[in-house]
Image (tube, helix red, strand yellow):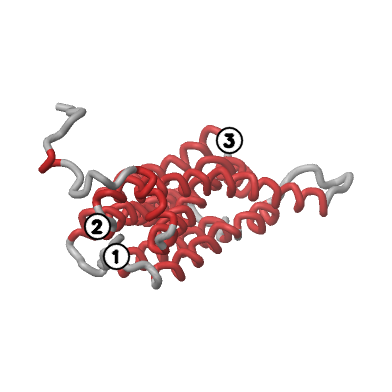
Amino acid sequence: IVRDNPKADAGSTNPSLNISVGIRFVLKNPQAWLLALYSMLLVAPIAAFAEMWGVEFFQTSYCLPKDFAASFLANIFLGIAIGGPLIGWFGSQFTNLRMVMLIGCLVTFSTLLAIIYIHSLSFFTVSVLLFLFGFSTSNMLLCFAIANRIFPSFATGTAIGFINMLIMAGGAVFQPIIGKLLDISLSMSQSVFYTKLTLSDFQQALTLLPSCTLIAILLIYFIKPNQAENP
């Protein structure tokens, strides 16, 4: 099935262009940076909240045991698993992908605010919000489809790899930033009667995550999903 030497008509339309040319083309292309930054900003709340600080947040805000708090967060990944293919299909039905991305970001922003700042919700409501958060965040997968659409064949793989690289880098950046903000909150309020993080500490530190979504919304207006990027 896998061929090391595909036929000429099945491969690149311009075989003289090598990997270094594709890398330079992508790194100099504003659309590649916009798509990568947009994806990174949407995945940042997943990496920082769902993958790291969410368990402690729910332990503090709802006084849950660790295993129950972790099972709560599974709703986010369920939303991503269902939302990824559905949003991909939905996006294929419309030429205006920016509108699909905007709606997804608005839902992400709204659900994040509710999860972080409203701590008197029922467990069922929180589960639904977490699912919607994951579902709407998966609209960042449209960036890979856009890259495949607008970049020439010699740069498509490089563009997709570049987007994925910044997504992973975002997790490595935002997880410790949230931790540092929590450390600052704890050190500023440290006393004999104050030995652990409070809900207010988490809310202040996690404010960074909805802010990422707002920046992503601004980037949407500069992304051109239907304009081919020629060398």
Mark 3 and mark 1: span between their CA atoms?
A: 45 Å
Which label is found at residue 149? 2
Q: Are marks 3 and 1 in contact (CB under 8 Å)?
A: no
| Residue type, label 3 | Pro
Question: For mark 2, does the 10 Å Cα neighbourhood hold few (<14), some (14 to 19), or many (20 or more) residues?
Answer: some
Question: Residue 55, relative to residue 159: is it above or below?
Answer: above
Give left or right: position of 133 versus 90.
Answer: right
**Tag 2 secondary structure:** helix
**Residue ranking furthest to the right:** 192
Mark 3 and mark 2: span between their CA atoms?
A: 46 Å
| Residue type, label 2 | Arg
- Count of labels in the image: 3
Question: Residue 5, relative to residue 29: is it above or below?
Answer: above
Mark 1 and mark 2: span between their CA atoms?
A: 8 Å
First in sequence, mark 1 or 2: give its number: 2
Query: What residue appears at the point 53 percent right and 32 percent down from the top-left corner?
Result: 67
**Tag 1 secondary structure:** loop
Q: Position of residue 58 (x, y in %)?
A: 57, 45
Residue on which disc 3 sits:
65
Question: For mark 1, does the 10 Å Cα neighbourhood hold few (<14), some (14 to 19), or many (20 or more) residues?
Answer: many
| Residue type, label 1 | Pro
Q: Are marks 1 and 2 in contact (CB under 8 Å)?
A: yes
Query: What residue appears at the point 46 percent right and 64 percent down from the top-left corner?
Result: 216
Q: Quadrant of residue 125?
A: bottom left
Query: What residue appears at the point 64 percent right and 45 percent down from the top-left corner?
Result: 176
Residue on which disc 1 sits:
225
**Residue ranking furthest to the bottom:** 221
Give left or right: position of 154 versus 128.
Answer: left
First in sequence, mark 3 or 2: give its number: 3
- Where, quadrant-wise, is the N terminus in this rendering? top left
